[in-house]
Image (cartoon, coloured by chain):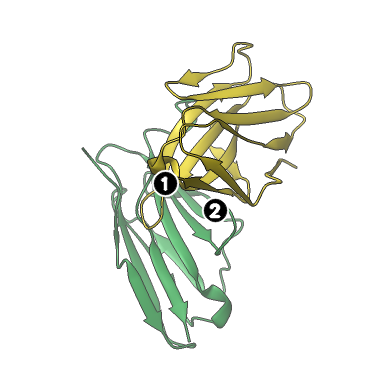
């Protein structure tokens, strides 16, 4: 069964360092989401792509976070420099299309970031 | 603004018993979708059940069913015949405009053998 792949599963870094997360959505899924999930809370959207275009990055802290999906397939989320408050689970999700009420998001297992 | 509220941070149920998880949401829209997602420990989040707001009939999926009260903006999940594998975080989610998801803070469900 097709799955959303994410790496690394776990990342420990020191503050002020750079960190990057990678996501490969299910083949054919045009829409890709990056969510941040702080322990004990629900996922919060950071950025949403439709193919290679950003359709929503209103909650992305652009002074330190960046995201790209150059060929409309896999995606990278970068944090530079990392801060203590960035410790969280970073979830990638994909869905078949944008603007159609299929509704289902397919999630990866997430990348857990710990900033020391 | 759309908000989703789950007022039960944690719940417990005895194996084979029934449990209901609560969710309320705030919206001014008339057409939207509601979901329950399950996040097992160290595993990916998966869809449990979906409800279209224009449908009056409550959705059911095997042991999972919802009580959708549109006027009250309430969307509860009932799990019947609870199993050990049902232990997880459960998130209520609201889909607006077909592409914007809003998640609640989650309810941790413990299943006691």
Q: Name the tint of chain B in the rendering.
A: yellow
- Dots 1, 2 in contact, CB < 8 A: yes
- Chain A on-screen colour: green
Task: For mark 1, name the chain.
Answer: B
- Neighbourhood count class around disc 1 (C-alpha, 10 Å): few under 14, some 14–19, many 20 upward: many
Circle 2 chain: A
Q: Residue at x 66, y 22 (%)?
A: B68
* Front in this rendered view, residue B63 or A61: B63
> Is residue A8 shown above or below A97?
below
Name the residue at 46% across, 64% down. A89
The quadrant in which residue A26 appears is: top left
Residue of label 1: B45
Image quarter (top left, top right, bottom left or bottom right) of the N terminus of chain B:
top right
Q: Is residue B31 visible?
A: no
Q: Is residue B42 visible?
A: yes
Name the residue located 71 percent from the left edge and 29 percent from the top edge.
B74
Task: Farthest residue to the left: give it.
Answer: A1
Residue at left offset 34%, top offset 71%: A10
Q: Which mark is residue A43?
A: 2
User: In the picture shown, does residue B91 fall above or below A39?
Assistant: above
Q: Nearer the viewer, residue B27 or A116?
A: A116
Q: Is residue B94 above or below residue B44?
A: above
Along the line of sight, which residue is nearer the eye, A100 or B70?
Answer: B70
SS for callout 2:
loop
Count the marks.
2
Whole-percent x, y for residue B65 in the image: 53, 23
In the figure, is residue A57 to the left or right of B6?
A: left
Q: Pinpoint residue A112: horizontal percent, then vertical percent.
A: 41, 68
Classify residue A72 as left or right of residue B48: left
| Quadrant (top left, top right, bottom left, bottom right) of the C terminus of chain B | top left
Residue A34 drawn at (x, y percent): 45, 55
């Amino acid at each position: 069964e097709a799955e959303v792949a994410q790496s690394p599963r776990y990342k420990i870094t020191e503050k002020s360092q750079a960190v990057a997360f990678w996501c490969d959505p299910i083949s054919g899924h045009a829409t890709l989401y990056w969510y941040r999930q702080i322990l004990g809370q629900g996922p919060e959207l950071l950025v949403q792509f439709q193919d290679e275009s950003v359709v929503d990055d209103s909650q992305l802290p652009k002074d330190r976070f960046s995201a790209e999906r150059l060929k409309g397939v896999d995606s990278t989320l970068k944090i530079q420099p990392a801060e203590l408050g960035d410790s969280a689970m970073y979830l990638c999700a994909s869905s078949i299309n944008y603007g159609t009420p299929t509704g289902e998001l397919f999630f990866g297992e997430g990348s857990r970031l710990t900033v020391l | 603004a759309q908000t989703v509220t789950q007022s039960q941070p944690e719940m417990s149920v005895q194996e084979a018993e029934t449990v209901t998880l609560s969710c309320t949401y705030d919206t001014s829209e008339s057409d939207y979708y509601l979901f329950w997602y399950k996040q097992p420990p160290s595993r990916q989040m998966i869809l449990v059940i979906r409800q279209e707001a224009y449908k009056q009939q409550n959705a059911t999926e095997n042991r999972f069913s919802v009580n959708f009260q549109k006027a009250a903006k309430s969307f509860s999940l009932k799990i019947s015949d609870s199993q050990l594998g049902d232990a997880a975080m459960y998130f209520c989610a609201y889909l607006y405009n077909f592409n914007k998801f809003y998640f609640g803070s989650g309810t941790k469900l413990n299943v006691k053998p």
